[in-house]
Structure formats: C-alpha cells, structure tokens
Amino acid sequence: MVGMSDDSTRGWISGGGRDTTQLDLTSGGLVPSPRDNRQVSGPAPVVTHDTVQVDRSVFSSDRVPSPAIATGDRAPDPLADTGSVDVSGVRLRPVEHHLDEILGAVPQPDPIELAVLDAQGLLCAELVTSQRSLPAFDQAGLDGYAVRAADIATATVEQPVDLAVVGETAAGDGEPASITAGLAQKVAVGAMLPAGADVVVPAAWTDQGAARVQVFAALAPGSYVRRVGDDVATGDVAVEVGTPIGPAQISLLAAVGRERVAVRPRPRITVLCAGNELVDVGAVAGPGQQVDVNSYALAAAARDAGAEAYRAGIMPNDRRRMVELLEGQMLRSDVVLVAGTFANGGHDLLQEALDELGGLTFTQVAMHPGPVHAFGKLGPDAVPVICVPGEPVAALVAFEVFVRPAIRLMLGKRQLFRRTVQAVSAQQLLSPLGYRQYLHGQVMRHPDGGYVVEPIGDGDQAMLARMARANCLIVVDEDVTEVSAGGLVTVMPMLLGG
Amino acid sequence: MVGMSDDSTRGWISGGGRDTTQLDLTSGGLVPSPRDNRQVSGPAPVVTHDTVQVDRSVFSSDRVPSPAIATGDRAPDPLADTGSVDVSGVRLRPVEHHLDEILGAVPQPDPIELAVLDAQGLLCAELVTSQRSLPAFDQAGLDGYAVRAADIATATVEQPVDLAVVGETAAGDGEPASITAGLAQKVAVGAMLPAGADVVVPAAWTDQGAARVQVFAALAPGSYVRRVGDDVATGDVAVEVGTPIGPAQISLLAAVGRERVAVRPRPRITVLCAGNELVDVGAVAGPGQQVDVNSYALAAAARDAGAEAYRAGIMPNDRRRMVELLEGQMLRSDVVLVAGTFANGGHDLLQEALDELGGLTFTQVAMHPGPVHAFGKLGPDAVPVICVPGEPVAALVAFEVFVRPAIRLMLGKRQLFRRTVQAVSAQQLLSPLGYRQYLHGQVMRHPDGGYVVEPIGDGDQAMLARMARANCLIVVDEDVTEVSAGGLVTVMPMLLGG
C-alpha cells in the first residue's frame, strides 16, 4: 500500500504511458479473458502522475473508471449536472481509512452469561478462578495397587516383594480405606488413595494377585498418585479473560463446577438490501428486475464470521416505511448492514431515509470492485450502519474487507484479518492505478513449494458462478498496475469458518 | 507408522536397552517434567525386540504400562485371575484398524432439504441446475450511456462524438427503451439495455451530459454490456453435488431462484458418560466423586466438528434404566458416543447393558493416552456406538483421532483429518514403544521459518488445565521411543472450527 493519498484521482485518469494493447475493455474486465475480443480503440494514454486538477485530455483507455463516481458525500445527479466532469472533485478514500472508521465505531457489546456449551467459539469475558481443587482428593493415577513406597524399595522382577491385598477401592467409592506396612489395596484409576499409601503400582508391574500381590519394581513415592490440586488448586485461574472457549476450556469449566460463563456475545447484525429492481428469491423476476441475493449472501457471510445475522430482506419502496423498518431493526441490532446501489443519485429514497435518521456519508473508497460505500451511526442509540455496494460480487468483497473484521472486533478476537500468503500468479493481472483491486481466484499449492494462484473470471462484478468457484481473493495494491505471469501477488485464502 | 503389527506387545515390555535414567516415572508421565523427582529405581531393562511370547524378566522401568490391559475383547477381572500375567495375550490394535472400523461403519445420513441460509457449511447433495438465465436480460454493466458502437467508432478525447440523449433507464425499470443511430440512452448499472444499443460507454468516459453527451473513446461492440446468460445460462450447473455451501454458493443459489437446497445433514450425535464416580456439574462432588466433564467437552467437540450434538449426561447407575436410555438415544441418533472407564472389569454395568443391546468389542488400541476403546453397532437399527476412555484428556484425544474424522465423513467432507505439520521439538520427548503417543503442546512459528513445538505438561491424562493451554497435538509414532530436543515431530494444530 505504497504511494496512496486520500485525494488521489489517479485511479482512472492516468495511464502511465504504457502499452494498452494488451488490455481488455470489452467486458468491463480489468483482467484479460481469453474469450473476449481484444479490439481496443481508445485514445492514447497520457502520463499525468500526481495531479489533482486534470483536464479531459488525460482520459485513458487503459483505465476503467469505477462504475459510480461520487463527488463529496452525496452522489450528484449527473442529469442535473451541466455537463462538466469535475474530476478534481472526486476524492478517493483509502481502504484503510474507511476500515478504521468502521472499526473505531462499532460497539463492544456487553458480556452475557451463557451455558458453557453455548459459549463454544466465543471469548471468555470473565476471570474464572476455581472454587475447587482438581483433583478434589488424592487418587490413583491408574489401575493397580496402592502401597507404601518404602515397602517395595527392594522389589525387582527377580526378587518381587509380596504384599497382602486387604481390599479394593473403585472409582466413586466414598469410603476411606487405609493400609499399613506390608499391605496393599487394589485401586482403580480415579479411586481415592487409601490412607497410608503413597504410591500406586501399575497392575501390569505386578502379578495382579487377588489375596496377595507380587510387585516387580520399586517406585519413587508419589508415583502414579494424583494429589489434591495437582491440576487446579482452589483459587487458581482456570480460564482467563479473552480466552477462546473450545472443548478443552469447556472441559475445564465443567471440572471447576461452572455451568455458565460470561462471554463476549455474538454481535447481532441485520442485513437489508435496497433497490427498486429487487424481488425476493421466491418471486418471478419481471423485466428489468433482479432477485435479491445480497440479503442471503451477506447474512450467510455474517454468520460464518461469527455474528448472529438476521436477514430482513428487501427495503420497502417507500421512504416512510423504510425509516420505520430501519428504526425497528436498529433497536435489535448491534450493526445494520445495507447492500444497495447508491451512486449517481436519482434513486436516493434510501439516502433520504438514512438522512432522516441522522445521515450517512457516502464515499468513494479506492477499491475495485465496488467503490461506493457509506458508514455512519444513526438513530438515538447511534447504531452503526454499514452500506456496501449492491452488486453481489462487490457486496461480498466489501463484507470481507470491512464487515468481517468489524464482526471479529466485536467478538473480541485478536486476529481481525484473514492471513494472507504470497502466491505466484499464473496469469498476467492488470489493475487500475490508485485502486486496491480484489480479484477472486483459485489458490493451490505448487508442487515445488509455495502457492500458485489463478484469477477466476475477468473481474466483472456480476459473475456469481465464477465467484462460487473461488477459494481466495487476490489483492493487488493501489500502486500496482500490472502483475506479470509468474509474479508474486498477495492472496487471502477464504476458508469457511476460518 | 513403521514396524507395527496388530499383535505387538512391545509397547510396554521391551525397553530396547537404552539408558533409563532420563525417564520420569514419578508422576505417571512419559515426558520429563522439571518439577518432578528424577529418582528411578526400577529394574534394568532387557533387550527383547520382536518377541511375542515374553517372560517376566523383561519388565522394564522405562516403559509405563497402559493403565488398563485387556486380553481379547472383554476386560478380565484381575481379582478373578489366578495371578498370571498373560502378556502374550494382550493384543494391541493399531490406531488405523480401529479408525477404519469406525469409518467403515458410520452411516451416510440421507440428504435433507434446508433453507439456503441453514445450508451454510454443509455439502450440497443435489446437482443444482439453473432454471433461469443470469442475467435474465441484456443489461448495462456500469453507469453510463447505451449507444451503438458504430456511432462512436471515431471518438477520441480530441474529437469526441456527440450524441442526443433520448432518455434514461434506471435499474428495475421494466419498460423497454430503444435507440437508433446517433442516439444515446443514459443507463444505470443493472438497467435493461435499450434495444438497438450494443455498448455502454462508462459515464467517466463522457462529458456526462444530460440532453446531449460527448463520448471520448471508441469501444468494441459488447463493451460493458452483460448479455443474457453470461453468468449462468438456463440449464447450466450452478452448484455441484459435494460442493461446500458458503456465502458465494448461497449467493448463486438465491440468484438461480433456490430458496431451499438438498444437503448432507449434520450427523446427530448423542453424548453420554458412564461411571459410578460421576456427578453432574451443578452438584457438590462428595468424597471419591468426580464431576462429569466429558459429556460437556465431547458435545462441544462434536459441535465444533460439525455435528448436531445432544448432551444426554450421566448414565443411570442401573442396568435396566441404562438399556432404556441407550435405546431411546439410539432412536434419535446417527451415532452414540459414550465416555467411561471400562477396563479391568468389576464395574461393567455398562458393558452388561451394551451386551443386552448386541454387545461391543472392547479393545486395546495402541495409543496413549487412553488405550481402551470399543465400537459396535447396536439395537435393531444397528446404530454405531463409540466408547472412548473416561479420562477427560484421553476422551478428547480419542475424539480427535476417531470421532472427528467420522463426523466429517458423515458430513461428506473430503478432508477427514486435520492437516499436520512437521515441527522442531523444543524438548526431548519420550514415548512408549508400540504405542502412538498424543501429547498436547503449543506450536508456534519459528522466527527462522518452520515451526517449533513445546509439550504442555507431562502426559498425565488428568491435567485439564494444561490441556486447555494447548493448541496442538504432538503425534509420536509407534516405533519412536525418543525424540531429542531439536528433532522433528509431527504436529496436528487444532484450530477451532477448522
């Protein structure tokens, strides 16, 4: 992420003077696709680095402008515009700035107490100290004979020590037994150690006798004995604040007697989508209409990230009802997530509704796909509302970049971001200068070590079938316009539940 | 896993003649622990490789016998035994044999149909073909002007082509528009492409005029146009059988109009624990009693592995009620998981109950901790019942080794096992010959690359607090008795949800 500035407009106006004949403009793609027409007949690019005030002569055919370019905090209506393209007014916001604003504003939900089994996967929100000792009593560490170490000090296989077996203690027997010199008590693993005994001889090191037992080996005092508090002493810390609760922690919590534990709760996220063109999955889409996929996909992604997601579906096409719906959902949500096509004005019913609740700032974020984003806190409770692009591929990319880290922050996780690896690109990649590009890809291990990644599709935002075949996002930095085949790129493997 | 045979008894009877002074027998541990007494006074080891018929002179102090040694398929009552240790009768079953039996016997639950959101994380069990085309109509790929490519063939920044804007189509508009030569229609991304247009000029490549528009670049026909079926054509396969369903698949399923989808269901696993000594977490443990931790820990582990787990708690201490409980749980379960201390007879109420339902084969598996395992199919429906050791640490190790792969197999996952890495051991590790040892450890990246692992604790099965600090299992093969500090070991990182 080098050489990026908040007000950079270089993304789509500066070509850097390089050869454009390898670029593919025929399908909106930034990455050449073999099936596409290679014909390009745009104007020759002009080098104009680091300029903010730009004249029209710098329009360059090797830069694909973002679909929606807003000026300032509200998308202008271009039809009300008098025909001038105020390029210098387009301010691109670095991805990190937008992310930081969101991470800085999401709430830290109060801890809740859950049954230990329901706490699985969450972070402990209390310091759990043990009110008990584990073990609670001296006990046998394995099946064998409880004896006095002094009695068997000379025992060998050749010259076993012979002891009288005076009884047997099973696990769970609550009656205290005791032995004295020359005696042995048969014990099961977990059984109370008889008073007087200080060692348990493993059964296999004896003749396993019933009335008398021959011991074949000497043992140091304490061998195969579990003493009170060996595992956890009363007052010991069992689980610390911030520890992820998994089966081992649940085991320990149960052992110290906890049926419930305070945890960081799953954030409650309501997912809405907005757009005149949207109809629900069950409906038959009429001419010009699109099925709502975002409320499903984003709710699924939010659950996968650890949130409790509510799919509230498509926004009503009426400002009053929109405001009511948003108000209702904000009451029950830690975050409201809205997917929609907001840019370029004219369809700003949602923006009016959001304004009524306090207003969001729509910004151009320096990323591809889907640069138009918004974030703000709305309503009396200042509930964070995150708006992501309505194109389904861009919506899921935006989720990865902004929403998943926010969910993990609310969960209290230390690792907010997916790990990335460096991979060799199997193909040449082209990327718009000034924009961080996220491309879906398939990453695999290279037989000679390391990773190889292949982009899937050509970057078109509408390609759901291709996205579904991806197992990673390829991240091309803002200052990189081209990655040659064989070059290294950053790859973010996207494992479910990871 | 070299040099192991099904009937090997070398595990605890053969010392291989190596120096035993570094071994620690004082706390039942196989790994030296700094706080422990180093005194060892066992008999000198005798080299007896590859022998099955063994005499007593080979008892060796550097081998810790497993706590429970059964002969054949049922634990004998050693008190009924006449004192002879029939070592050659102990048959150790290789870990893989036991695993294979379980994997070969677990059911493949029938596919069920779920709402797409509930299908997340499961594997698709049907071939989903699209009944629709995506897109359903030719549409604009971004905001701009729909024009005829022929009209703008000469457009450059210096000599723009000027067209009359005859209207505007927003996303969702269902009324077909059309243009002819010399005309342009303003279009939003996703809007229907007007008849006659074959290209969309990105707004940023124009002067964004209202009544007339100046176009600065030529474009090949089809540029920024999404054609019917470009993404998915009618009849195309959208999601294949066996595909894991994540947000991207849910996005695609919604887009092709699916509200429900057939998936491999989560296996239903009932978790029970057995033992006279057990009391529920909420209860006050009396003398000799232990809190039931296994039903919690194993249910949590089963959920983490993807199962739907029911914690049925502690078995009643009565054979009749035990049989009824088991029968009831088997009716509603794909697998029943029972944790208990079964070995060495005498406390075989559970074994009698299991016998009444068809009987399980208890075997000594060549692993540490917890060698006593059982598996069988019980009742009229032949429901698989897996018995794992009752020691909580051994129970969770057994879960990792046998139950988690079985759950993943039932889920239809291709990858049944956790990935392993080779790591440098920070300490010397000792391991019983003939047993595959699983030690909890902490694995971390080495600054110079690769991984370093440190064992946690000394291998005592009762150490829950130590287990809770582990992030991996160290696996020491059956034929390895010692790993020196700095040597390589196999490590199985245990990420939650992984």
Image (tube, coloured by chain):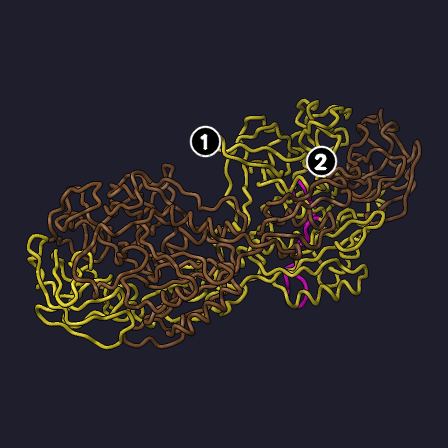
Chain colours: A brown, B yellow
In the image, which residues are magenta?
B366-389
Viewed as shown, does residue B266 lie left or right of A5? Answer: right
Q: Report the mark closest to the observer, 2 or 1.
A: 1
Viewer-side residue, B90 vs A453: A453
The picture quadrant where one finds residue B185 is bottom left
Residue A447 position in % (x across, y down): 37, 40
- Name the residue carrying label 1: B449
> Rounded to the nearest whole Å, what is the CA distance between mark 2 and mark 1?
47 Å
| Residue type pointed to by label 1 | Gly
Q: Is residue A377 above or below residue B438?
A: below
> Mark 2 and mark 1, same subunit?
yes
Residue B489 occupies quadrant: top right
- Mark 2 closeness class: few <14, some 14–19, many ≥20 residues within 10 Å: few
Q: Residue at x 20, y 50 (%)?
A: A63
Question: Magenta stretch mostly in which secondary structure?
Answer: strand
Q: Residues within 10 Å of mark 1 (few under 14, many from 20)?
A: few
- Residue B364 seen from this side: no
Q: Secondary structure at mark 2?
A: loop
Sequence-first disc among 2 and 1: 2
**Is A472 displayed left or right of A429 in the figure?**
right
Tell how many labels: 2
Give the residue pinned by disc 2: B53
Q: Is residue B482 above or below residue B174?
A: above
Q: Is residue B414 above or below residue B197?
A: above
Q: A57 or B333: nearer the eye? A: A57
Given the image, on which type of amino acid does mark 2 rest?
A: Gln
Q: Position of residue A272 (x, y in %)?
A: 43, 66
Quarter in which the N terminus of chain A is drawn: top left
